[in-house]
Amino acid sequence: MPLDPDVKAALDRRAAAGGPAQYEIPPAELRARQEALQRKPGPEIAAVSDHLVPGPHGDVPVRVYVPITDDPGPLPVCMWFHGGGWIYGSIDSNDANCRELANRAGVIMVSVDYRLSPDHKFPVPFDDSYVATAWAAANAASFGGDPARVAVAGMSAGGNHAATVALRARDDEDGPDLVHQSLIYPVLDRDFERPSYAENGAAYYNLSLEMVRYCWDCYLADEADGDHPYARPMAADDLSGLPSAFVLTVQYDPLRDEGEAYAERLRDAGVPAEVSRYDGVVHGFFNAGIPFERTWQAMDEVAADLRKAFGTA
């Protein structure tokens, strides 16, 4: 399928503007550029509150979004881990996403401001995400949430965190009991020989092979960490006992094949897993702050999947 016209126009404008590739920009400058982007504000919601979660590497900021809903509660809770290749991204830059999903799904979204690489390498960002999830499950009642209905969700590097948090929650005897994982074009492997890398690894398609390699280099302290399932979920020997999954992939994305392969492995392990591929679009299109027309279709599908997983459909 050809590129969506709106997406192609945006990519053409970016190509015409020129400038260095993302992996050629120092991380601090890249973060500043990303945070400075003009974004569409998200919708009004019932309540927003900021919290600090104690963790092994210091406090982890989280933001709780309570939706406008007729449901008297307690409401389901969904963690949100932002994308940005572990290098950039924040609660603020993902504010619109969380507001939209909270209202559309009728869930409390908890956005996690995990520490960024290369300043903080694995396992620090992962640890932040896990302790924030454990905190949300343990304290759900304090913000109107249902501790028996907690899911994890994230996009790109945040999708990696959603998958790895689900793995550790399963492995930890006292870990949070998660009911679902929503993985939006997630980073799950380091196999750069997959066909989707050959087809979509050019810089024009928004996420290049060089950028993916750079992100992994920034995230991992050494090569051995790349074989740890809490860094690379595809390295896990056993995927049984994990919560059900929804995996959103896109046609023009080097990460497409690993997302679909992970869903197949989940199904082989007896875990219900659904894949929804969006043709004609690129990595990064799931962004309510800088949306394309197709963004809203994806938002609605993710929200509908969460309602189904939580039994509120």
Image: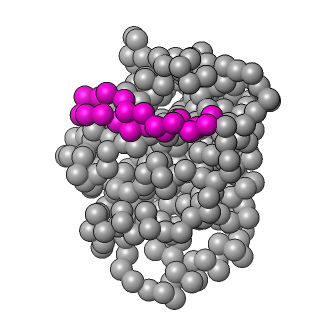
Q: Residue at x 40, y 43 (%)?
A: 113
Q: Is residue 145 left or right of residue 310?
A: left
Q: Which residues are magenta?
A: 47-66
Front position in the image: 261 or 165 = 165
Q: Residue at x 30, y 73 (%)?
A: 24
Q: Quadrant of residue 140?
A: top right
Q: Can residue 56 be seen from the camera position used here?
A: yes
| Number of numbered tags placed on the structure image | 0
Secondary structure mainly formed by the magenta segment: strand
Q: Residue furthest left?
A: 222
Q: Is residue 73 left or right of residue 123?
A: right
Is the N terminus in the top left, top right, bottom left or bottom right quadrant?
A: bottom right
Q: Quadrant of residue 192?
A: bottom left
**Does the magenta segment cover residue 49?**
yes
Q: Residue at x 41, y 30 (%)?
A: 132
Q: Residue furthest top?
A: 173
Colour theme: one colour
Front position in the image: 64 or 26 = 64
Q: Position of residue 8 (x, y in %)?
A: 64, 77
In this rendering, the answer to whether 50 lies above or below 192 is above
Is the C terminus in the top left, top right, bottom left or bottom right quadrant?
A: top right
Q: Position of residue 127 (x, y in %)?
A: 32, 33
In this rendering, the answer to whether 251 lies above or below 185 is below
Q: Is residue 209 left or right of residue 76?
A: left
**Does the magenta segment cover residue 88?**
no
Q: Residue at x 51, y 76 (%)?
A: 204
Q: Quadrant of residue 302?
A: top right
Q: Is residue 7 left or right of residue 193?
A: right
Q: Position of residue 145 (x, y in %)?
A: 60, 22
Q: Can residue 264 be seen from the camera position used here?
A: no
